[in-house]
């Protein structure tokens, strides 16, 4: 597996305009449908979504790898762990 495929999302989820905690629930459900080790890109609004969702995902055992400020929204890269404890 090349380095570029490690950072290329396997799926994308646009949750702009989705309120908390629905955006976290939808992100978690999508991650649970993915294979272990796969990467999900999530688009979130600024404010409460980008403040709450990454922390909630980390507490749920997911790996938040990168948060990018895309001016009008944030791009969040989350990896489903190979083993969920």
Image: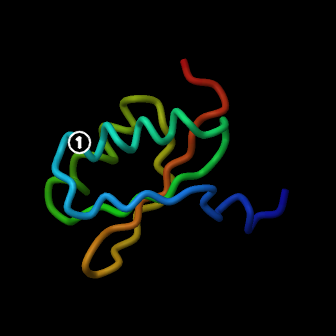
Q: The C terminus is located in which quarter?
A: top right
User: Residue at horizontal 49%, vertical 50%?
Assistant: 78
> In the picture shown, does residue 4 fall above or below 76?
below
- Please determine whether, in this image, residue 61 is positioned above or below residue 12: above
Dot 1: few (<14), some (14–19), or many (≥20) neighbours within 10 Å?
A: few
Is residue 61 shown above or below 68? above
- Residue most extreme to the top: 85
Seen as rendered, the residue at the extreme right is 1
**Rendering quarter of residue 43:** bottom left
Colour theme? rainbow
Q: Which residue is mark 1?
A: 22
In screen coordinates, is 7 left or right of 23? right
Which image quadrant is residue 82 in?
A: top right
Residue 36, placed above or below residue 38: above
Q: Position of residue 55 (x, y in %)?
A: 31, 42
Residue at image location 31% in from the left, 37% down from the top:
25
Asked if residue 71 lies left or right of residue 13, the reply is left
Label 1: state its secondary structure.
Answer: helix
Q: Which of the 4 image quadrants contains residue 20?
A: top left
Horizontal and vertical percent position of residue 22 = 23, 42
**Circle count:** 1
- Looking at the image, which is closer to me, 7 or 15? 15
Q: Position of residue 27 (x, y in %)?
A: 39, 44
Q: Is residue 60 left or right of residue 25?
A: right
* Screen quadrant of the N terminus: bottom right
| The one of 33 and 65 positioned closer to us in this rendering | 33
Q: Which residue is at the front of the view, 34 or 79?
A: 34
Residue at x 40% of width, y 66% of height: 75
């Amino acid at each position: 597996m090349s380095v570029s495929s490690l950072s290329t999302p396997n799926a994308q989820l646009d949750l702009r305009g989705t309120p908390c905690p629905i955006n976290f629930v939808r992100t978690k459900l999508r991650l649970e449908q993915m294979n272990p080790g796969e990467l999900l890109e999530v688009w979130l609004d600024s404010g409460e979504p980008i403040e709450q969702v990454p922390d909630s995902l980390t507490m749920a055992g997911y790996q938040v790898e990168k948060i990018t400020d895309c001016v009008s929204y944030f791009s969040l890269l989350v990896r489903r762990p190979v083993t969920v404890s």
